[in-house]
Image (tube, rainbow, N blue to C red):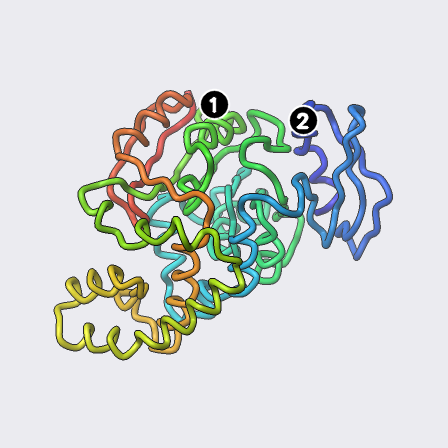
């Protein structure tokens, strides 16, 4: 972070102002330090990132996977523009619009470069994750006065209210204890008329037949490293069948069969075979390790958005299930 970022931060417990102490600089950036509050709470700055949560929490699996796959889903690494296409088509924002954008649940930071394009040279992107994935995101997204990473709880944001112009939350809500509480917390930070965009795993007629929900009661109890190593061996063993399905069935049917077999299939993205397998390693773990994975009905997402204070609410089928958007009343 830089010193100017302090004006946006508050104590997530008492909502009081924070003071910067014991700071160590690297150029204009604060590499280490402490943010202290009058309520006696203190929050360390470690590796340029203010930390407002315990080291270990329910999102540890995401910290593990994104530090294993720091740049796997980056367009610069994959050779395709999957992240760019999804970001701009879901948000409907344009480069250099400016303002302050909040990225809720940055993971490895695959969407961060495009959010930075939107804020431009004069705006600010505040990007946070509950897990240590923020350290992975920092690898692919160098810090500047336009980018502030935080390790924070979506339920207790260390941000002043009514300061955010736009907020997007992709691939996160289904992995929280309560999607509605998470949405309401994010919307509190928005200015009046501020835009909110999110997605959520769908509950529909296919959900009872989704194989991952049959095995997750077991896999969520397996240590992360053990599950990840098993997943790599499983994908390698099943890969000949994956290629057989792609060759002898229609793309749509092959995709459906492979996912039912717990072989993540991103063939439609145009990835090389090497990258397809790497994405499969990642997504096998991503499906089976998170503590929470709670799909909902589209009308439930619509209801949450309205009840949390949005108007002009729209929901539809999107990249990751349901897509929802609206503006703060």
Residue plotted at (39% across, 39% down): 198
Residue plotted at (20% across, 73% down): 246
Q: Are marks 2 and 1 in contact (CB under 8 Å)?
A: no
Q: Is residue 307 above or below residue 124?
A: above
Q: Earlier in the sequence, mark 2 or mark 1?
A: 2
Q: Quadrant of residue 232?
A: bottom left
Residue plotted at (46% across, 26% down): 184
Residue plotted at (77% across, 37% down): 35
Q: Looking at the rendering, in which quadrant would you find the C terminus? A: top left
Which callout, 2 or 1, points to the residue nearer the camera? 2
Compared across the picture, whether 314 is left or right of 225 comes to: left
- Looking at this view, name the residue that lies furthest to the right: 22
Measured from the top left, where is residue 286 in percent x and y? Answer: 43, 56
Q: Is residue 19 above or below residue 27?
A: above
Q: Is residue 324 above or below residue 318?
A: above
Label drawn at residue 192: 1
Q: Is residue 69 above or below residue 28?
A: below
Mark 2, residues whose alpha carbon is within 10 Å: few (<14), some, or many (≥20)? few
Measured from the top left, where is residue 12 in percent x and y? Answer: 65, 29
Q: In this orientation, does residue 145 appear?
A: yes
- Which residue is under mark 2? 13
Label 2 residue SS: loop
Measured from the top left, where is residue 217 in percent x and y? Answer: 39, 48
Mark 1, residues whose alpha carbon is within 10 Å: few (<14), some, or many (≥20)? some
Measured from the top left, where is residue 302 in percent x and y? Answer: 30, 29
User: Number of callouts in the render?
Assistant: 2
- Of 324 and 229, the residue lying toward us: 229
How much space separates mark 2 and mark 1, taking CA atoms? Answer: 24 Å
Compared across the picture, whether 254 is left or right of 8 comes to: left
Label 1 residue SS: strand
- Of 235 and 161, the residue lying toward us: 235
Compared across the picture, whether 33 is left or right of 146 comes to: right
């Amino acid at each position: 972070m830089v010193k100017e970022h302090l004006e946006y931060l508050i104590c997530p417990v008492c909502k009081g102002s924070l003071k910067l102490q014991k700071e160590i600089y690297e150029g204009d950036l604060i590499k280490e330090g402490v943010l202290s509050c009058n309520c006696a709470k203190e929050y360390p700055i470690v590796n340029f990132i203010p930390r407002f949560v315990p080291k270990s929490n329910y999102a540890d699996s995401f910290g593990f996977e994104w530090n294993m796959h720091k740049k796997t889903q980056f367009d610069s690494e994959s050779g395709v523009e999957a992240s760019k296409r999804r970001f701009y088509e879901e948000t409907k924002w344009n480069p250099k619009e400016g303002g302050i954008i909040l990225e809720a649940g940055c993971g490895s930071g695959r969407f961060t470069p495009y959010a930075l394009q939107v804020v431009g040279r004069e705006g600010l992107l505040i990007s946070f994750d509950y897990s240590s994935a923020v350290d992975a995101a920092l690898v692919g997204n160098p810090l500047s006065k336009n980018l502030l990473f935080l390790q924070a709880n979506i339920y207790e944001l260390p941000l002043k209210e009514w300061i955010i112009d736009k907020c997007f939350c992709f691939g996160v809500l289904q992995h929280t204890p309560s999607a509605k509480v998470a949405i309401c917390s994010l919307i509190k930070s928005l200015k009046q008329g501020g835009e909110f965009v999110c997605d959520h795993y769908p509950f529909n007629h296919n959900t009872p037949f989704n194989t991952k929900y049959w095995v997750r009661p077991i896999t969520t109890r397996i240590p992360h490293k053990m599950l990840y190593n098993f997943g790599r061996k499983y994908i390698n063993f099943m890969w000949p069948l994956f290629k057989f399905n792609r060759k002898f069935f229609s793309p749509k049917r092959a995709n459906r069969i492979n996912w039912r077999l717990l072989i993540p299939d991103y063939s439609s993205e145009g990835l090389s075979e090497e990258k397809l397998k790497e994405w499969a390693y990642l997504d096998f773990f991503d499906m089976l390790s998170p503590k929470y994975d709670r799909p909902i009905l589209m009308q439930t997402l619509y209801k949450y958005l309205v009840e949390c204070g949005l108007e002009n609410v729209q929901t539809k089928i999107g990249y990751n299930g349901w897509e929802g958007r609206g503006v703060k009343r």
